[in-house]
Image (tube, rainbow, N blue to C red):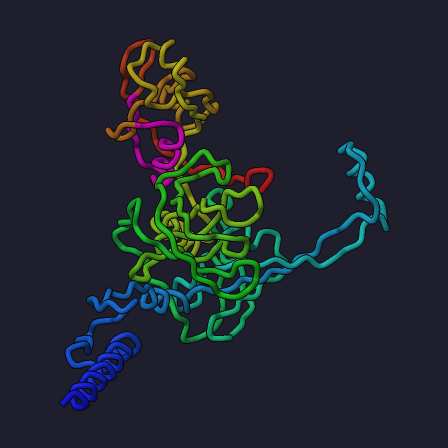
């Protein structure tokens, strides 16, 4: 009897040892420990499957329409360092044999906006180019010609002759908001088409000294050299902006990038295709912001509005009686925030439109009707 008890005890001990090893090393072998369908096991604990966040569908819709833009131009390079004196520099440049002509290449991006071959890009990407070549995502390449440029907004329209071109879709509602997820597609540093992700950090950025007309979308999606002219899209693959510039102390992305909104870009695109250039409304005056000191001097309740610093003789504003020192407070019944707001709202007005300015002069409010003219063509600001 004692012998049988000893055998039983040893058998139970061995079984318990085997059960311990299986439950530790292979718990899924035991009944009741199978994870239910659709659940994942992480660290030995089962839980509900998490939704996969992916923007692959948006990229698939937009990326084929984003192209690489390669430019070549001839530059005269001095054979020796030039002196600081401008007149002497000009004289030396004119001497035969003092400079050597070299080929310079650069790269950027562009967006196919129409199936008949029109491409939207930045003006600074193709500025002074002697030849332009476009490379599509599907491997096709084509020479491009310039249809028209708008240095004041840093936009340009190119044309290529290829068939079956993929085109991007514009956001018809222009509904981008601060905090929305956006994707930047382009060709940074020439490594090939690249997509980066971020959010809209701010809207209406201006006073950056980049363009004459500034109303940028700011984003932290990585934008690097070579991304200029590429697409900023929403999570549905629609174009919300043309990537244009970055703020950087190193030359690379610091999370502060700027894009031209798709709405103004689309208007400029249509004007260039129709007429080869852009026409903007113009009053023939130079507005300036109202500083707190000026607001106090003019006894204004706020610094809202734009003060007239200069009136061009025989211009539309001069003919309507606008004077230096007038404070423009409204345009066609809508308040004017500052000088940039005034310029941006004048730009889309057609020549011949009669605009009503709400003006404060010597403490009195006046209403002046001004017939809008066409803004004279201007060169790109120096230094760009």
Number of marks: 0
Query: Where is residue 35 drawn, in percent x and y?
Result: 20, 75
Q: Give 342 or 84, whichever is nearer the viewer.
A: 84
Residue 75 shown left or right of residue 117 in the figure: right
Closest to the observer, 148 or 315:
148
47 shown above or below 326: below
Residue 13 position (above or below residue 243): below
Q: Where 82 falls versus 56 (above or below)?
A: above
Q: Is residue 4 left or right of residue 286?
A: left
Q: In which quarter of the image is residue 349?
A: top left
**Residue under the point 48% across and 65% down:** 193
Q: What stretch is highlighted in magenta?
A: 336-358
- Residue displayed at 47% across by 24% down: 312
Q: Furthest residue to the front?
A: 2
- Image quadrant for the C terminus? top right
Question: Percent x, y for residue 197?
Answer: 39, 56
Q: State yes or no: residue 322 in magenta.
A: no
Of 326 and 300, which appears nearest the observer?
A: 300
Q: Can residue 148 be seen in this view?
A: no
Q: Position of 227 compared to 271: left or right? A: right
Q: Where is residue 314 drawn, in percent x and y?
A: 46, 25
* Residue 365 seen in the figure: yes
Can you say which quadrant of the picture contains the N terminus? bottom left
Front residue (pair 256, 293): 256
Q: Which residue is drawn at 23% across and 84% down?
A: 10
Q: Which residue is drawn at 35% across and 47% down?
A: 200
Query: How far across and how far down the image is residue 276, in percent?
Result: 47, 53
Q: Which of the 4 quarters of the picture holds residue 319?
A: top left
Relative placement, left or right, of 30 versus 67 is left
């Amino acid at each position: 009897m004692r012998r049988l008890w000893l055998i039983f005890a040893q058998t139970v001990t061995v079984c318990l040892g085997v059960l311990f090893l299986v439950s530790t090393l292979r718990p899924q072998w035991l009944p009741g420990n199978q994870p239910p369908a659709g659940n994942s096991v992480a660290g030995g604990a089962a839980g509900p499957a998490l939704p996969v966040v992916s923007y692959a569908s948006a990229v698939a819709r937009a990326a084929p329409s984003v192209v690489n833009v390669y430019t070549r131009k001839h530059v005269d390079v001095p054979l020796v360092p030039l002196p600081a004196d401008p007149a002497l520099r000009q004289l030396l440049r004119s001497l035969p044999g003092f400079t050597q002509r070299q080929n310079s290449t650069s790269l950027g991006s562009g967006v196919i906006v129409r199936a008949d071959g029109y491409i939207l890009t930045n003006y600074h990407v193709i500025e002074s180019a002697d030849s332009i070549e476009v490379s599509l995502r599907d491997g096709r390449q084509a020479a491009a010609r310039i249809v028209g440029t708008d240095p004041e907004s840093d936009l340009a329209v190119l044309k290529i002759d290829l068939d079956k071109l993929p085109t991007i879709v514009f956001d018809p509602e222009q509904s981008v908001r601060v905090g929305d997820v956006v994707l930047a597609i382009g060709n940074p540093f020439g490594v090939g088409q690249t997509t980066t992700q971020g959010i809209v950090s701010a809207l209406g950025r201006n006073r950056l000294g980049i363009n004459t007309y500034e109303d940028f979308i700011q984003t932290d999606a990585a934008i690097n050299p070579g991304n200029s002219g590429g697409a900023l899209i929403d999570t549905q693959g629609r174009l919300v902006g043309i990537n244009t510039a970055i703020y950087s102390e190193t030359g690379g992305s610091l999370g502060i990038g700027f894009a031209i909104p798709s709405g103004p870009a689309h208007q400029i695109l249509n004007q260039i295709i129709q007429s080869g250039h852009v026409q903007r409304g113009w009053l023939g005056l130079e507005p300036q912001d109202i500083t707190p000191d000026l607001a106090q001097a003019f006894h204004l309740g706020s610094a809202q509005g734009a003060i007239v610093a200069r009136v061009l003789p025989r211009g539309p504003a001069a003919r309507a009686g606008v004077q230096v020192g007038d404070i423009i407070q409204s345009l066609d019944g809508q308040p004017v925030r500052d000088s940039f707001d005034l310029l941006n709202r004048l730009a889309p007005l057609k020549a011949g439109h009669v605009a009503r300015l709400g003006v404060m002069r010597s403490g009195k409010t006046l209403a002046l009707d001004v017939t809008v003219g066409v803004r004279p063509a201007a060169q790109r600001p120096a230094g760009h």
